[in-house]
Image: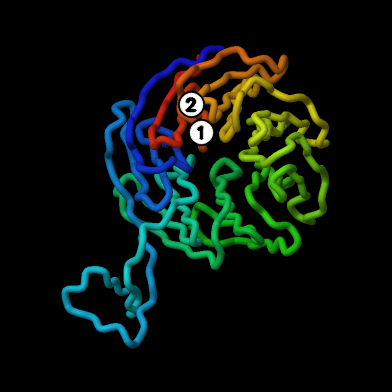
């Protein structure tokens, strides 16, 4: 298997890119960074197509004096607010089943845009900061996860169908299986715990790092759980029983982003040592190293394309053969 550099867009963001998504038609890439608009780029030209700006809305006090030409004031359902800082998107997701872009913000706002008209169709609000967002059941449901609660949204009508309180399980990041049976949670930085989604009974504990875990990924067949951490290791586990499978060793610094190939046989990783590595998950060997690729906090493989956003604010795409 080969990984070949494809396209690059430089200086997309002034800060590190934290979330990235490729639309199913492979024509648009959406990226989000700290306190910046969501940028939409055309692929393969890597030209800026659109910006989505969502600002904090600060309630006005009775003492505030307003002028007619005050452009920082916005009115919503009869109430007036002052526009504050640009909010940071925690995740951007192109729907796989409908022409929509989902943008979830750290403050709990969720905005859904129709990518044919680029009009905002739906706006939802959660009372807490969002930590994880995921589409499941082939895009039919959207999971929004806060520190203590899971919200399930039907993407056919964008209605909340279910909420689950997790009063004793603090969530930093999480992944849900497609069948809704198991949730994998980074709960205390050094380990991952899995729970039965219906009963919330703990099933397995995955320990593979001596320092903080940065990302967890499930293989497309959901048989292998991979974690990467500040110790430079990538750990592989049997996702069903929690059994440790092996380490992928070779990075000289922290590993922040990983993803599986569509055939489940390979894994790609990005590190602060500025290498992008392709691993064989059966032999645990590194089969390809690409030098001078800035560290990425987010990456995703879409079929034969790898898309990543770097800490230097750039977008890189790679072809996978």
Observer-nearest residue: 69 or 144?
A: 69
Q: Residue at x 34, y 43 (%)?
A: 39
Q: Which mark is residue 114?
A: none
Q: Residue furthest bottom?
A: 62
What whole-number distance in Å separates the C-alpha atoms at marks 2 and 1? 7 Å
| Circle 1 crowding by C-alpha within 10 Å: few under 14, some 14–19, many from 20 | many
Is the residue under label 1 in contact with that under label 2 (CB below 8 Å)?
yes
Q: Residue at x 49, y 31 (%)?
A: 295
Above or below, 264 against 86 in this view is above
Find residue 182 and report its horizontal and vertical position in percent. Answer: 73, 45
Q: Residue at x 56, y 64 (%)?
A: 128
Q: Residue furthest left?
A: 69
Residue 41 located left or right of residue 142: left
**Residue designated by label 2:** 306
Above or below, 109 against 292 in this view is below
Find residue 86 and report its horizontal and vertical position in percent. Answer: 36, 57
Q: Residue at x 61, y 23 (%)?
A: 251
Q: Which mark is residue 299?
A: 1
Find residue 133 and report its horizontal and vertical position in percent. Answer: 55, 49
Which comes before the other along the chain, label 2 or label 1? Answer: 1
Secondary structure state at the residue bearing disc 2: strand
Observer-nearest residue: 140 or 120?
A: 120
Secondary structure state at the residue bearing disc 1: strand
């Amino acid at each position: 298997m080969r990984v070949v550099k494809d396209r690059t867009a430089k200086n997309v963001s002034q800060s590190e890119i934290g979330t990235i998504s490729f639309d199913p038609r492979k024509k648009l890439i959406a990226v989000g960074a700290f306190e910046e608009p969501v940028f939409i780029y055309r692929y393969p030209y890597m030209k800026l197509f659109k910006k989505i700006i969502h600002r904090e809305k600060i309630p006005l006090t009775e003492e505030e004096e307003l002028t007619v030409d005050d452009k920082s004031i916005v009115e919503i359902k009869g109430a007036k607010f002052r526009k504050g800082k640009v909010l940071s998107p925690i995740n951007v997701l192109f729907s796989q089943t409908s022409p929509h872009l989902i943008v979830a913000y750290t403050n709990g706002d969720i905005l859904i845009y129709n990518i044919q008209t680029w009009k905002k169709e739906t706006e939802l609000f959660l009372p807490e900061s969002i930590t994880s967002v995921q589409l499941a059941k082939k895009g039919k449901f959207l999971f929004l996860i806060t520190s203590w609660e899971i919200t399930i949204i039907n993407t056919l009508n964008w209605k909340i169908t279910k909420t689950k309180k997790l009063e004793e399980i603090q969530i930093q990041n999480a992944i849900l299986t497609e069948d809704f049976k198991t949730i994998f949670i980074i709960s205390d930085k050094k380990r991952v715990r899995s729970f039965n989604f219906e009963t919330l009974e703990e099933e397995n504990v995955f320990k593979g790092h001596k320092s903080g875990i940065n990302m967890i990924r499930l293989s497309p067949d959901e048989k292998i759980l991979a974690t990467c951490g500040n110790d430079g290791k990538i750990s592989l586990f049997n996702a069903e029983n929690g059994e440790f499978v092996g380490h992928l060793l070779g990075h000289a610094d922290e590993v922040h982003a990983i993803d599986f190939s569509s055939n489940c046989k390979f894994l790609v990783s990005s590190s602060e040592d500025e290498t992008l590595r392709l691993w064989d998950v059966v032999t645990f060997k590194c089969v390809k190293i690409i030098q001078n690729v800035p560290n990425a906090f987010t990456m995703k493989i879409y079929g034969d394309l790898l898309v990543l956003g770097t800490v230097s604010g750039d977008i890189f795409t790679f072809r996978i053969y």
